[in-house]
Image: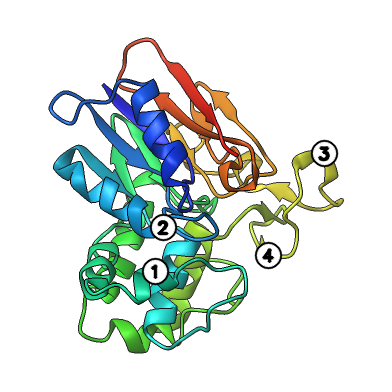
Amino acid sequence: MHYLIGDIQGCDGPFERLLERIGFSPSRDSLTVLGDMVNRGPHSLKTLRRLASLGSSAQAVLGNHDLHLLAVAAGARRLHATDTLAEILDAPDAAHWLAWLRHCPLALQTQGWLCVHAGVLPQWSAAQTLTFAQEVSDVLQSENWQAWLHTMYGNQPVKWHDDLQGSERWRCIVNALTRIRYCTPDGAMDFKVKESIASAPTGLIPWFDLPTRQTAHTPLAFGHWSTLGLINQPRLLALDTGCVWGGCLSAVRVDGGRREVFQVTCA
């Protein structure tokens, strides 16, 4: 059986209980975490160790908090007061975990589901999403990964153009895959509004409701948007149910059998 799991964010205790809840067996089952494995929760290092201990039965895409950890390690960002990343950065095997994260993709396809952390731009097909994500992965796995992280942050460009190049192109890809929530009707990303759909300002549309979205007929799963809550539709899964904020940690079985939702509460 294969499970998709929402944002863990260093909440290793609930993650352990969720694995127990679904009866996860590495020899029989597999899972995909939809990004934000670390930060804000109390046990980011334990979370990475638990994921890695599952070997090839576990995979994950990178989220904005995972990239933030890499950026801090590269000297491109400073730790925030609410960050809980010091235990990783100070660990004797910190270099191992940073390399482990750098080799996680920003998008992948499994069991027919396109998996990303935040979303995709309306112009992208599933194949293009995977191709563009691989471009960024190639940079992250190169010798220049630290220098590139110094150029990663920023809100521009807000719209995709095929002729984007270099850091602007990769920044746009990263922002779509790890930060997007709302867009304007013409597909420009908005990074200010984080509220639920009920509170959305006029003129902004959730990225997945854009009528021009090329992946509308592709099963797509994402996390990132805790105020959105669980969405469980035939071709759309939103799985950030706010574990780190006292909500639930969620998993959904997606291997073609009966779809099941599993949740554990988080203190």
Type of the residue with mark 3: Ala
- Determine if residue 163 is in view: no
User: Decide: marks 4, 3 in contact (CB < 8 A)?
Assistant: no
Asked if the residue at tag 1 contacts the one at tag 2, i.e. Cβ–Cβ closer than 8 Å, the answer is yes
State the residue in front, 130 or 8: 8
Give the mark nearer the N terminus: 4 vs 1.
1
Q: Nearer the viewer, residue 144 or 168?
A: 144
- Residue under pointer 3: 198
Q: Is residue 217 above or below residue 145?
A: above
Which quadrant of the figure contains the N terminus? top left
* Residue 177 makes an appearance in the image: yes
Q: Nearer the viewer, mark 4 or mark 2?
A: 2
Q: Residue under circle 2?
A: 44
According to the picture, the residue beneath numbered tag 1 turns out to be: 87
Toward which corner of the image does residue 173 lie, by quadrant? bottom left
Instruction: Look at 20% across and 69% down and name the residue there.
Output: 96
Q: Could you say where residue 218 lies in the image, as x and y percent from the top left? A: 42, 33
Q: Mark 2 or mark 1, which has the lower sequence index?
A: 2
Q: Amino acid at mark 4?
A: Phe
Q: Of helix, strand and loop, which one carries label 2?
A: helix
Query: How far across and down, in percent of the image, does residue 110 sit?
Result: 28, 36
Q: Name which residue type carries label 2.
A: Ser
